[in-house]
Image (cartoon, rainbow, N blue to C red):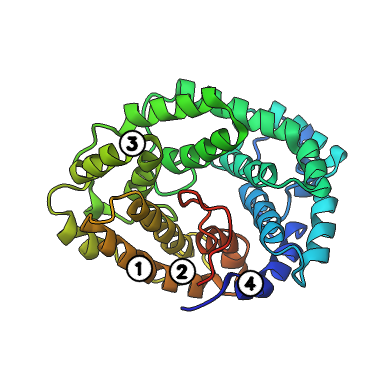
């Protein structure tokens, strides 16, 4: 599928804007401590109550912020600014922070990692408007970073799933934030944990992927994290041991794009996100290898195959797709996780 970033944004950003404050349907993740905790999504989460669930609301706000950064004069810009101003008020963020203090393990690690990604995007912009938003969000940023430090300090083993609780992907987003924010302590903590969890891994079980509801690849997410913490030559060697001596044969066999059988099923629709996240992880891993490495061309080809299917499916109108996959598509289309990537990549 051939699509430019601008065309994609002009098609989907207006819809995402309407989702930011669409309260229902809502897959509310909320632990009740008593009768006083019974409340609507908007009462519980005054800034991030839309987009079906909290983490999708957070990364959909990231999506809008990034779109504005790359295309500040786009047709959707005015409506996007209005929507973000509606969300990013001191009162709304005070409500969010009060909830998080009552529920300290809420959305760990996935949602807090997306909070940090949102703040990374704002930190890389220097307009008066983004500075105001960043100031309002600063207490939430501090909370997310603190919770991540606490989470890593207590985590004895990596969580190697393909869904929200996966360790590697959340660590990747948090590491990218730590480097942008200049938080050397958190960056070092993540690198240390990554090495402890993954450095000795051998013969990744690609044949066991995917699970039926994955939207992240456990093995690709691990490699995508390790490319960030290992020197390039070390990473290239590590990747041979991780994928084993037959990587050139097994990668095409086990990493074919997935087909979604029911877009209205929120769990089965996860394969849309899996194709998109596989694509950007494959691109990132390939970019970290030496130019002559024989794995690069295979990884790039596989990334392109996943890109085509993932972007096609990200345009599906069902809300079980539309409330979250545009963020994944934008992350891919703009090369957000690639080394040195700061601007859009037209495709």
Q: Is residue 214 left or right of residue 343?
A: left
Q: Earlier in the sequence, mark 3 or mark 1?
A: 3
Judging by the rendered image, the residue that carries numbered circle 4 is 6
Q: Position of residue 288 (x, y in %)?
A: 35, 49
> What residue does disc 1 label?
257
Furthest toward the front, the residue is: 291
Q: Quote the CA–CA distance across marks 3 and 1.
A: 30 Å
Q: Nearer the viewer, residue 333 or 38?
A: 333
Q: Secondary structure at mark 1?
A: loop
Q: Are marks 1 and 2 in contact (CB under 8 Å)?
A: yes
- Residue shown at 66%/40% (left/top)? 30
Q: Are marks 1 and 4 in contact (CB under 8 Å)?
A: no
The Cα–Cα distance between marks 1 and 4, rounded to whole angstroms, is 25 Å
Marking on residue 325: none
Residue position for label 3: 231
Query: Does residue 336 appear in this view?
Result: yes
Neighbourhood count class around disc 3 (C-alpha, 10 Å): few under 14, some 14–19, many 20 upward: few
The reply to whether dot 3 and dot 2 touch (C-beta < 8 Å) is no
Closest to the observer: 331 or 197? Answer: 331
Label 2 sits on residue: 310
Instruction: Please state the horizontal and vertical placement of residue 242, each as a whole percent of the image.
Output: 22, 43
């Amino acid at each position: 599928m051939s699509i430019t970033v601008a065309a994609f944004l002009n098609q989907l950003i207006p819809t995402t804007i309407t989702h930011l404050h669409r309260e229902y349907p809502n897959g509310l993740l909320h632990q009740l401590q008593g009768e006083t905790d019974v409340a609507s999504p908007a009462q519980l989460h005054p800034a991030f109550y839309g987009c079906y669930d909290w983490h999708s609301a957070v990364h959909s706000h990231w999506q809008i912020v990034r779109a504005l950064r790359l295309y500040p004069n786009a047709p959707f810009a005015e409506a996007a600014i209005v929507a973000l101003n509606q969300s990013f008020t001191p009162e709304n963020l005070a409500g969010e922070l009060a909830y998080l203090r009552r529920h300290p393990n809420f959305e760990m690690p996935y949602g807090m990692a997306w909070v940090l990604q949102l703040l990374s995007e704002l930190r890389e912009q220097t307009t008066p408007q983004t500075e105001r938003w960043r100031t309002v969000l600063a207490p939430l940023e501090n909370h997310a970073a603190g919770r991540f430090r606490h989470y890593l300090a207590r985590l004895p083993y990596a969580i190697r799933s393909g869904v929200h609780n996966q360790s590697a992907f959340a660590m990747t987003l948090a590491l990218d934030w730590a480097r942008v924010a200049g938080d050397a302590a958190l960056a070092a903590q993540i690198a240390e944990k990554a090495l402890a969890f993954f450095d000795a891994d051998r013969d990744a079980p690609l044949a066991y992927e995917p699970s039926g509801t994955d939207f992240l690849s456990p093995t690709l997410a691990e490699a995508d994290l390790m490319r960030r913490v290992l020197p390039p030559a070390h990473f290239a060697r590590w990747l041979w041991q991780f994928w084993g001596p037959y990587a050139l044969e097994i990668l095409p066999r086990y990493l074919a794009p997935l087909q979604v059988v029911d877009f209205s099923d929120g769990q089965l629709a996860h394969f849309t996100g899996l194709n998109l996240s596989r694509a950007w992880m494959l691109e990132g891993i390939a970019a970290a290898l030496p130019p002559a490495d024989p794995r690069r061309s295979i990884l790039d080809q596989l990334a392109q195959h996943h890109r085509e299917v993932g972007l096609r499916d990200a345009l599906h109108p069902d809300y079980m797709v539309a409330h979250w996959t545009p963020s994944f598509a934008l992350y891919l289309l703009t090369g957000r996780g690639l080394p040195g990537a700061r601007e859009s990549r037209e495709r």
